[in-house]
Amino acid sequence: MDTVAATVFRSAAATPHKPPILTGRMPPYGSSFARFPSNFRFTVKQQQLHSSVFLPRQGHRRRSLVVRAAASSPESFESSSNKIAPLQLESPIGQFLSQILKDHPHLVPAAVDQQLEQLQTDRDADQQKQDPSASSTDLVLYRRIAEVKANERRKAVEEILYALVVQKFMDANISLIPFISPDPSGRIDSWPTEDRKLEQIHSHEAYEMIQNHLNLILGNRIGDSTSVAQISKLRVGQLYAASVMYGYFLKRVDQRFQLEKTMKVLPSAAEDESSARQNAMDDTRPSGAGGVSHVMSHPEVSTWPGGDVSPGGFGYGIKPTRLRNYVMSFDSETLQRYATIRSKEAVGIIEKHTEALFGRPEIVITPEGTVDPSKDENIKISFGGLKRLVLEAVTFGSFLWDVESYVESRYHFVLN
């Protein structure tokens, strides 16, 4: 099934409401693949913060926990050894939750619920206000103020989502990869191995799909954790963002699969192992005279210098799975819906987290419409390090689906 090969051909930045469809067929590398937004600039604002979280007690009495986040210089803030995530949150709510994550991570859910309740109260109050029956200038100003407030709430929801994702990594005792920077040897993968912990987060069926995703990317290097390759940093960043989107999609379909399996209403196609094996064979055979398997158009095949991943090795290892067969039973409309990230806020978090991890790329488009490779930076990374990056990205996407659903149940912001 082309759709579950876990690559992306529609840019989330170009179409925020309709994130990429997951497919095995990729157009030539260029503007259509998960680019970072060219106009995005992230700055950290240092300010004094004074907020309260109200924790319910028995009866109607409530206890107030006051957390103070003292400002520090940008240099010491960025170099802090207790930095728990690459993206630094800048809204008052985001900075407050960052401090809670560092000092009292178990209080994050209570803090989030209180902030969402306040956001809902503010939004209801704004919606009840009527446009002033005044001059046109006053009306424009009034609507502009309402727009600014709405944007502030949207940013707060974005950063609430991010704080909840980070908390889920902390609960699993998994450290997020910090900002990508080379060590003295030029390598970037000096982070600890967390593969086993990352694997255990997912269901058995979902992890089988993740293994297929890794096989498509690493091919016959899947078991080689020590060899080092020199790779385009931009391409690795795109791979990370695409894998986040794949993890979001995968958790969404796996949630439905597990429910139908529990209720014993799975379609027969999902139970038919022989059908799954046949589909896997169809996916890896040539597509006609002079044609090759669809996985050969997977964009990462051109990443490796010197053709380290051969045509035979690249598509090798794609295994039939029940979940894969289940997804293949979807009609095109259902597949489109499940492959769409539901909110602008979730898309924004993917873009900002990826940029915080890899830095803001300098992208120059040639007159022919391709990316000028002279502006790209090459990095050294082991295949084991690349596997760790992909596993974290898929898990990030899975957690993002969970927290988006949680926040939506308390504060409606998903439009589709």
Image: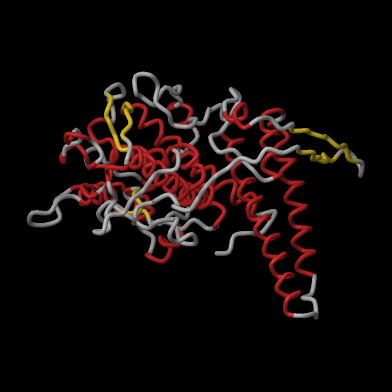
Q: Residue at x 65, y 58 (%)?
A: 151
Q: Residue at x 28, y 48 (%)?
A: 372
Residue 336 % position (x, y): 41, 62
- Number of marks present in the image shown: 0
**Considering depth in this image, is 3 or 17 the residue closer to the camera?**
17
Q: Name the quadrant containing residue 233.
A: top left
Kindly give the residue lying farthest to the left in the view shown.
289
Residue 311 % position (x, y): 16, 41
Q: Name the quadrant containing residue 208.
A: top left
**Considering depth in this image, is 149 or 173 the residue closer to the camera?**
149
Residue 228 drawn above or below residue 107? above
Residue 283 % position (x, y): 22, 50
Question: Does the image show residue 1?
Answer: no
Q: Residue at x 53, y 28 (%)?
A: 174
**Considering depth in this image, is 335 or 49 the residue closer to the camera?**
49
Residue 123 drawn above or below residue 197? below
Q: Residue at x 59, y 60 (%)?
A: 414
Residue 342 drawn above or below residue 354? below
Instruction: Report the colour scheme.
Output: secondary structure
Quarter holding the C terminus is bottom right
Question: Does the image show residue 372?
Answer: yes
Residue 33 % position (x, y): 35, 52
State left or right for residue 213 relative to residue 107. Answer: left
State left or right for residue 212 relative to residue 65. Answer: left
